[in-house]
Image (cartoon, grey):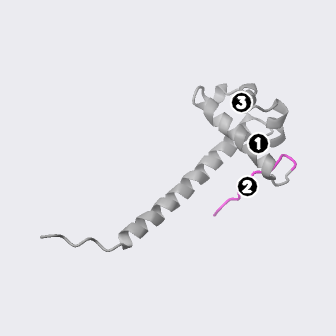
Amino acid sequence: MTTDTTPLARTGQPLHKHGRKTYDTLLDSLAEHLRDTTWRAASIPRITTNAGRAPGAFYHYFPDLESALLALVHRERDAGRALSEHLEAITALIAAQPTPEATP
């Protein structure tokens, strides 16, 4: 079963180019912030300041910190899945190549 993890604004509308950029910038800032602190100590003001956005921008996309954390987990999971699929395809291509003849 696959789940659609397309980001939406809190209004339920799909994000357009600018909105997607802001959404991703906020998640990038959250990921960076989590390198310095635990998720329980994460701070929305620090996330938004580091992202160069107002706190209201955060709340436009996420009702709370837990929702942003979940969105980050989904994004990273999807990125890992895409990387895994890419590596499997490369491995299959390499395996399909003829092996070089052994030189005497």
Placement of 94 over or under 47, stated as above or below: below
The quadrant holding residue 28 is top right
Between the residue at mark 2 and the residue at mark 1, the CA separation in whole angstroms equals 14 Å
Q: In the rendering, which numbered label is found on residue 6?
A: 2
Front in this rendered view, residue 33 or 104? 104
Placement of 17 over or under 31, stated as above or below: below
Q: Residue furthest left?
A: 104
In primary-sequence order, the first of circles 2 and 1 is 2
The residue located at (64%, 49%) in the rendering is 74
Between the residue at mark 3 and the residue at mark 1, the CA separation in whole angstroms equals 12 Å
Q: Residue furthest right?
A: 11
Q: Position of residue 88 (x, y in %)?
A: 46, 63
The quadrant holding residue 90 is bottom left
Q: Does 10 appear in magenta?
A: yes
The residue located at (80%, 47%) in the rendering is 18
Stretch in magenta: 1-11
Disc 2 secondary structure class: loop
Please identify the quadrant where the C terminus is shown: bottom left
In primary-sequence order, the first of circles 3 and 1 is 1
Amino acid type for the residue under numbered disc 1 = Thr
Amino acid type for the residue under numbered disc 2 = Thr
- In the picture of the structure, the residue carrying the numbered disc 3 is 47
- In the picture of the structure, the residue carrying the numbered disc 1 is 22
Amino acid type for the residue under numbered disc 3 = Ile
Placement of 75 over or under 49, stated as above or below: below
Neighbours of disc 2 within 10 Å: few (<14), some (14-19), many (20+):
few
